[in-house]
Amino acid sequence: MAVSKSTLSIVLIVLGGLSVLFGTVLVFVGPIIIDDQIVKNVEINPNNGLSYTMWKDIPVPFFMSVYFFHIVNPDEILKGEKPTVVQRGPYVYREKRWKDNITFHDNHTVSYKEYRQYFFEESMSVGNESDLVTIPNMLVLGASVMMENMPFPVRMLLSATFKSFEEGPFLTKPVGELMWGYDSKLVDFLNKYFPGMLPTSGKFGLFAEFNNSNAGQFTVFTGQDDIRKVHMVDSWNGLKSVNYWRSEQCNMINGTAGQMWPPFMTKESTMPFYSPDACRSMELVYQRPGMSRGIPVYRFVAPKTLFANGADYPPNEGFCPCRQSGLLSVRTCRHNSPVFISHPHFFEADPVLLDTVNGLRPNEDEHGLFIDIHPETGVPMNVSIRLQLNLLIKTVSGISETGKIAEVVMPMIWFEESGYIDGPVLNTFRTNLVVLPMVMEYMQYIFIAFGLAGILGAVLLYVNDKVRGLLRLFCMFEYFTYNIFSPTIYIGTSKNRDYSENYNQKCVYTCSFQISRL
């Protein structure tokens, strides 16, 4: 049975109205539903399989790429000439991280220790751990600077100690030994008679204390009571602040532990985090939007003020005594050794630093650090943290091993810790926290569009039906009017009668044709 156009119009109006109503409700309710799902998925809760697994075991590839500054003119440096270095590497290590000793507390916080292990990846490296590299001997040149204010006889005794253990100002050793430790009679002597003087009780290496270790006990907020506080550090090793620096602000433990951040970030947001390795809190700032493996992200980078000195940026005065901008002294938290942190190749540092060493070529693409983060969830999608370790070297009277070395902050190594979400974890993340919320957001507009289209179709059907009716009425009026008055007007000849019949047929045909087009 055919459905009339009037009935069809009513059905379309009802369905269209309901669709518009539902879509309008989704406009207001949809974001609330999406935000609620994000909150449930990003809070630290063992019942949240996806986010809790990502937080606890970090099931994504993490790598540490290490670059050495190989010294090509050690003899000339001892004569006071400018150091010349050649970058060697990268030597890439796969990094395994996991959290242990996880304890949830009643105040919506959780405590844990994060452990890390490193495994050499020769296939990703340029060279292997047996490559020989020449760098400054920290035991000699570092200790010399540390002892420069001691009485002259003490410095002479230190120099004699270096000679007795055959320790020179520079050392050439395999990469693996420089990284994870090498045997040294001097180290054994110091650990035996001066325990605690060195950061390690075993072999001495640049990263000896990092492998198979943890960065201390973090206590962070779970976000179950306030999602704005999720991952934010409540304490580190039981401390609310540290005492390494000269101001209360610089000693504050701010931000997260550097792995995840609270959700709903904007371009005005910053990314604060506490780094035990740098002994301080740091903060990244928004740079630009982008895409990472099909997921929209915000890129956050280090501001130029991160390692600025107190003269260029007064809030950093608490990190002083300072040298040129671009350097952070960590001697207060690294056994008083004259070690400085900077960006690789002195990127964004005072140009004076570049003039003291040959072979440095800084650029943002290779040496700038960044984090690409999904702003709605606060989950980093792509991370590249790049830092450089430098040693202050200079001539110290009474210690002949220092020769005539000109005072210089000497680059030793720089490293990049990088990681990105990929594989099944990426697919699950994209589905649960990106695709589904996006579909829900688009559905509200689709319902409104279909609803408006239905209402418009109903109006057109209604207007069409009314026009057809009016046209029929007009044709009937014209037909009967003509037949009533035509006998009077055209009475008489056969010619007039033929014209009358032709006109009737033309009128009926024209009206039928016009109606059929509607």
Image: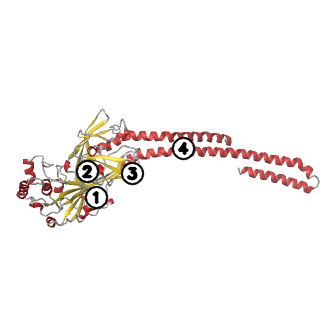
Q: Can residue 422 be seen from the camera position used here?
A: no
Give the amino acid at mark 1.
Answer: Ala
Estimate the spatial distance between the alpha carbons at disc 4 and disc 1, rounded to whole Å: 55 Å
Looking at the image, tell me whether mark 4 or mark 1 is earlier in sequence order.
Answer: 1
Give the amino acid at mark 4.
Answer: Phe
In-front residue for pair 151/365? 151
Label 1 near label 2: C-beta < 8 Å?
Answer: no
Q: Which residue is mark 1?
A: 349
Q: Secondary structure at mark 3?
A: strand
Q: Position of residue 231 (x, y in %)?
A: 32, 42
Q: How many marks?
A: 4
Residue 95 disc label: 2
Looking at the image, tell me whether mark 2 or mark 1 is earlier in sequence order.
Answer: 2
Looking at the image, tell me whether mark 3 or mark 2 is earlier in sequence order.
Answer: 2
Q: Image quarter for residue 46?
A: top left
Q: Which residue is mark 4?
A: 447
